[in-house]
Image (cartoon, rainbow, N blue to C red):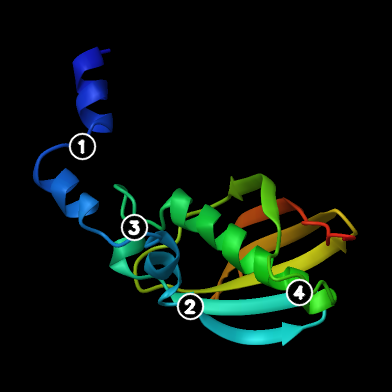
Amino acid sequence: MNLDSVKKFLEKKGETASMVDGLPPKFLEPLTLSSLHVDLIEPGRVVCSMKIPPRLLNGGNSLHGGATATLVDVVGSAAIPTVGYSSASTGVSVEINVSYLDAAYVDEEIEIEARALRVGKAVAVVSVEFRKKETGKVFAQGRHTKYLVLPSKI
């Protein structure tokens, strides 16, 4: 293994670094979510769809795992207020787990379904399933645990 090549791969410098440094703060969610469409919201459940844009691809030309994890975070969090949790925040992530079962590719239509499994006083647990719209095949499954901010008693 060439250790210098590993370092070079991880340390993106030069033109790419200056371009990335010029991005606005908190750009990750708009980058990931700008293609998302909300199809259904009901108590305990949010269903969204999107056509995978080229900007969310990895080196293998499939949906990047980091983009999938971001969608687990954001779409999963959206399911929490549907069961009556009414804080200004949907809490703080404690754990995010994603199982990648298959690949999804550019321009492929996908569906993302988040279900609130439990929303208690201090903890919420949500499952998120990713399906290919054309076949219904599940290509990723996520679970998101969040600590819910307790309201002040003062």
Residue 21 image point, x, y percent: 22, 50
In this rendering, the answer to whether 91 lies above or below 81 is above
User: For the residues marked 3 and 1, what is the alpha-carbon distance in whole angstroms?
Assistant: 18 Å
Residue at 65% x, 78% y is: 47
Of 36 and 105, the residue lying toward us: 36
Q: Quadrant of residue 35?
A: bottom left
Residue 39 image point, x, y percent: 61, 87
Q: Nearer the viewer, mark 2 or mark 1?
A: 1
Crowding at dot 2, Cα within 10 Å, few <14 / some 14-19 / many 20+, comes out as some
Q: Quadrant of residue 32?
A: bottom left
Query: Which residue is under mark 3?
Result: 57
Under mark 2, the amino acid is Leu
Of 55 and 77, the residue lying toward us: 77
Under mark 1, the amino acid is Lys
Could you tell me which quadrant the N terminus lies in?
A: top left
In this rendering, the answer to whether 122 lies above or below 90 is above
Query: Which residue is under mark 2?
Result: 36
Q: Is 80 on the left-hand or right-hand side of 118?
A: left
User: For the residues marked 1 and 4, what is the alpha-carbon distance in whole angstroms?
Assistant: 39 Å
User: For the residues marked 4 and 2, what is the alpha-carbon distance in whole angstroms?
Assistant: 19 Å
Under mark 4, the amino acid is Pro
Under mark 3, the amino acid is Leu
> Which disc is residue 81 wearing?
4
For the residue labelled by badge 1, is the local secondary structure a helix, a strand or a loop? loop
